[in-house]
Image (cartoon, grey):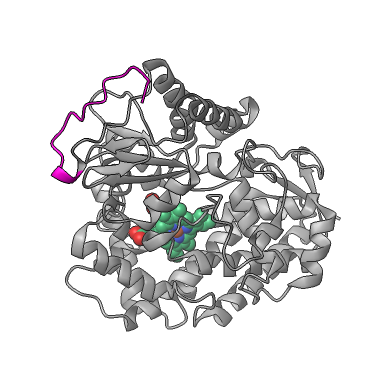
Amino acid sequence: MSDGMDRTIPYPVPDSLAGLSAIPKARFLDTLAILFRVFLPTVAKGVIIRRPAMLAIADRLDLDRRAIRAMQRLRGEYGSGPILLRIPGRSLAIIADPRDVHRVLAESPDPFATATPEKTAALSHFEPKMALISKGQERADRRRYNDQVLQSHTPMHPMAEHFLDVVASEARQLRSNLRQRHKALGWEDFSDTWFRIVRRVIFGNAAREDNELSSMMARLRSAANWAFLRPQRHRLREQLLARIKNYLLRADPDSLAGMMAQIPATSQTAPEQQVPQWLFAFDPAGMTTFRSLALLASHPEQARIAKASDLSGLGQDHTSYMRAVVLESLRLWPTSPLILRESTTATVWRNGVLPPNTGLVIFTPFFHRDDEQLPFADTFTPELWMKEQPEQKYALIPFSEGPAVCPGRHLVLLLATAMLSELLTGTQLRLSSPNRLVPGQPLPATLNHYRLRFDLI
Ligand code: HEM
């Protein structure tokens, strides 16, 4: 290779790798561009809980679009990578090619561990024993437990019918409140209803009004946004876990807590520490549902197809148009913008060898909205998802993929499609803010869900 850089491997490698060269590091200024245009805005918006003011700024300054442009420039400069950044004290590589995304996710957790130092620092604020930040046998056991409770292998959870009743009754109440008060629908009303649904699904009816539980989660997540930079709130975490345990002791049979009571736990499982992830992750599911509503309210043709095709909330395979709408909303505005892995050994790539203990960063908005590669990048295209497998030449990975794929994805799609169906059949909604979702025009790279407003007509 003729980039003029010293590519001698600067760390011990097995004999099988002798003769290969190290992946070159990006120049300092190019590294700075990625730090300031990709990482900083993403982290400032809040990775664990969104910061409304920062989201508004990102929206106004089009920071997500700039981040995608910065990644395109990096790829233009260094090729399809991976590209090692020049960061003192941390080996960090950014993935720039869909083939490498598929590889990293397929080869998790070994040699690409899910537990990276950054993720562990953030999530251990409220769930230090959660599967994603666990290793070895503990990770395997905790993942198994999540799979069994969430029934991740099937689109229809055994409790699906009950959960759909919960969505229907809460949506009915929301509609009637809005009508009585002649109110527009904004995030506050929507999210109040959504979190009632989430608490009932996870713990049963007794938790319906437990706003304190959601507020404890929000406080811990705010601290978690700062990862290493903020001390952990141990007392608050203990209070949260005690409150969760209390619900688990009562185990309402019509809830995930009821399901947990039937699933064997070992001395390693730490069941109550898997639950905060569910409470936390249903928040992005709510954002996605609300954004999907905005897409449908602003795209009459797609709304017509959605209404005609699938209003039961039950169609959960690739033929369901409403499910495709939700997945497409996640492609356009992915709620997990950074998927991180940590290599446990030296790994070989097209352009050389990466050292062990390298952090690998997959910046999902780049792969979902790369208008140099994706003909549909900025267009609302639910049809993309109406296949058994999304096309492998792209990396469309809202729920990740491979052995660490989100085990809650089917539940999310079930509840989101059910909620959309309820709102579309029971009300006529017109998107009053923002006015930038226009069929035939490129969709914005940021959609601030806090600002979405719908008039009832
Ligand atoms: C829109 C909603 C959601 C999205 C976009 C989403 C996406 C993801 C992604 C991308 C990952 C992989 C993270 C990584 O590798 O670093 C993940 C993991 C996970 N998700 Fe979700 N998720 C959502 C909601 C949920 C819900 C509601 C639950 C539970 C009810 C859940 C449970 C989990 C768990 C337990 C993991 C860890 C899996 C492991 O360690 O192998 N997620 N999710």
Count numbered badges in the picture. 0
Relative to 24, residue 433 above or below: below
- In the displayed structure, does residue 252 sit left or right of residue 59? left
Give the image quadrant in which the ligand numbered 1 is located. bottom left
Q: Main secondary structure of the magenta part?
A: loop
Tell me where the magenta segment starts and ends, as one range.
Answer: 1-16
Q: Position of residue 274 (x, y in %)?
A: 33, 63
Q: Nearer the viewer, residue 426 or 376?
A: 376
Question: In this view of the protein, can residue 278 be seen by the observer?
Answer: no
Q: Position of residue 357 (x, y in %)?
A: 22, 40
Question: In this view of the protein, can residue 388 be seen by the observer?
Answer: yes
Dividing the picture into quadrants, the one containing residue 151 is bottom left
Q: Nearer the viewer, residue 125 or 38?
A: 38
- In the displayed structure, does residue 373 sit left or right of residue 243? right
Relative to 127, residue 264 above or below: below
Q: Is residue 122 magenta?
A: no
